[in-house]
Amino acid sequence: MIYKESIEALFKEGLIKECLVNEKAVINLIKRAHRDIKTAKRNLVEDEDCAYSYAYNSMLRSGLALMMAEGFRPEIKDKPLTVVRFAAATLGRQFNRLLNDYDFMRRKRHRLVYEPDIPCSNEEARQAIQTATEFVDAVSALLKKKNPQFKIQFK
């Protein structure tokens, strides 16, 4: 599901608030997102659920970095969903497939945590890692383009 709203709508709903841009936090979140992908790959053979969760975490962290770079942070209510909605409002239509996959992964990861009988296949985990890699790379590229101070290597 793609959320068709603006940052203004998220602000009016009380889901986001303005904050100072913290370049160090943005860089650290992106670096951690790349490490999460590496960790997901290492866990793929042993624990698909863990690999899936780390892939999802990398997307959440890069989404948070995107928010912080734009001068926003999520409020307490529905943080993971707010990050997805903010990313959709910021990234635009060319990222619809990735954003749909991100939202699906958010819901699947929730089920993996709270409904432990729901399995995650190796193929699902492998696809999650691929999606996460594309998303984190896209956010990293956007941050570098919009903010010249982020020219350092995130990986």
Image (cartoon, rainbow, N blue to C red):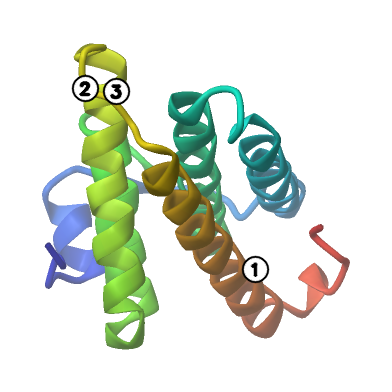
Q: Position of residue 115 (x, y in %)?
A: 19, 14
Q: Which residue is mark 2?
A: 118
90 versus 10 height, above or below: below
Q: Which residue is mark 1?
A: 140
Left or right: residue 20 versus residue 148 is: left
The residue at the point 32 percent across, 82 percent down is 92
Viewport quadrant of the C terminus: bottom right
Q: Amino acid at mark 3?
A: Leu
Marks 1 and 3, how far apart in space? 27 Å
Viewport quadrant of the N terminus: bottom left
Q: Is residue 106 visible?
A: yes
Q: Amino acid at mark 1?
A: Ser
The residue positioned farthest toward the right in the image shown: 152
Q: Position of residue 71 (x, y in %)?
A: 50, 58
Q: Which residue is mark 3?
A: 112
Relative depth, front residue between 70 and 118: 118
